[in-house]
Amino acid sequence: MDLRYYQDKVVVVTGAGQGIGRGVAEAYAAQGAKVVIAELHDDLGLDTETFIREQGGKALHVRTDVCDPDQIVELMKTVQERFGTIHILINNAGVSRFGSPYELTVEEWDTVINTNLRSTFLCSREAAKIMRRHNEGSIVNIASTRAFQSEENSEAYAASKGGIISLTHALAASLAHDSIQVNSISPGWIETKNWDDLRDIDHVQHWSGRVGKVVDIANACLFLTHPANRFVNGTNLTIDGGMTKTMIYVP
């Protein structure tokens, strides 16, 4: 897989101010892509942009609230005006609200669904309108292993991530006519901040022998959006060190 393909490709990453989104943005920039950082918080987005530029990469922060459909339209318009097209979209922006289903408010439910799920559809639709003009494009939606397994008080988040996986294969079917590839990634435990605080038991419970890192998800994005892997389409890639396949018996 020749990563020189990404030279000067236009890549939009939502929620790229921190965590997985930032790692993905940095990974594409390291391969020469022009990365658009769609981030709600200016301080985080500008910090990512500055870091990439200091490393010799190309980056542009565009403040975007993905809960606002008009801002999503404006984001894609800005990208097209600045760079002419969009080659790759990574739908990463997301929030969580954990609490008893007896107490979860409608507003909290809507915030999670609109940020995580609705924005994935709207960003994909608006980006695809630009991608199809050049008859090429690749979209990766960041879901979660919580789409398949749960702990208590996680209803809104689980519903949003399960919806992303279903939306992924639906979009893959609809956008195939325009040569736009759509896949999703379901990360497991990806430590983004406090690696040194992890315990041995945190690592050894994973078949891979460690907790996940942001680079694990970034590498998967590079794999899925590369033209050598166009036959991977409409699928979900679980990256969790084997956790969701672990058989658990209560002694």
Image (spheres, rainbow, N blue to C red):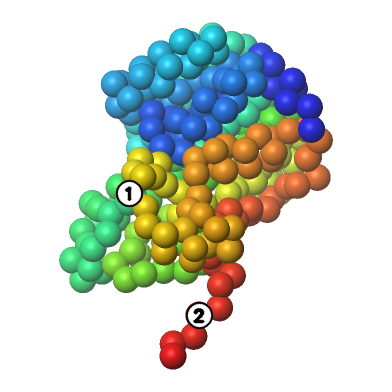
Expressed as whole percent of the image width and height from the top left, the position of residue 209 reads 55, 58
Q: Residue at x 50, y 50 (%)?
A: 212
Pointers 1 and 2 in contact (C-beta within 8 Å)? no
The kind of residue tagged 1 is Asp
Expressed as whole percent of the image width and height from the top left, the position of residue 145 reads 50, 60
Name the side, left or right, on which 92 lies relative to 8.
Answer: left
Name the side, left or right, on which 144 lies relative to 152.
Answer: right
Q: Secondary structure at mark 2?
A: loop
Q: Is residue 14 visible?
A: no
Instruction: Count residues near mark 1 (Cα–Cα under 10 Å), then give few for <14, some for 14-19, many for 20+.
Output: few
182 relative to 72, above or below? below
Q: Residue at x 55, y 13 (%)?
A: 57
Q: In this view of the protein, which residue sits in the foreground, 168 or 58?
A: 58
The kind of residue tagged 2 is Ile
**From mark 1 to mark 2, how far is it between C-alphas?**
25 Å
Q: Which residue is label 2 attached to? A: 248
Q: In this view of the protein, which residue sits in the foreground, 51 or 130?
A: 51
Expressed as whole percent of the image width and height from the top left, the position of residue 122 reads 49, 37
Q: Which residue is label 1 attached to? A: 197
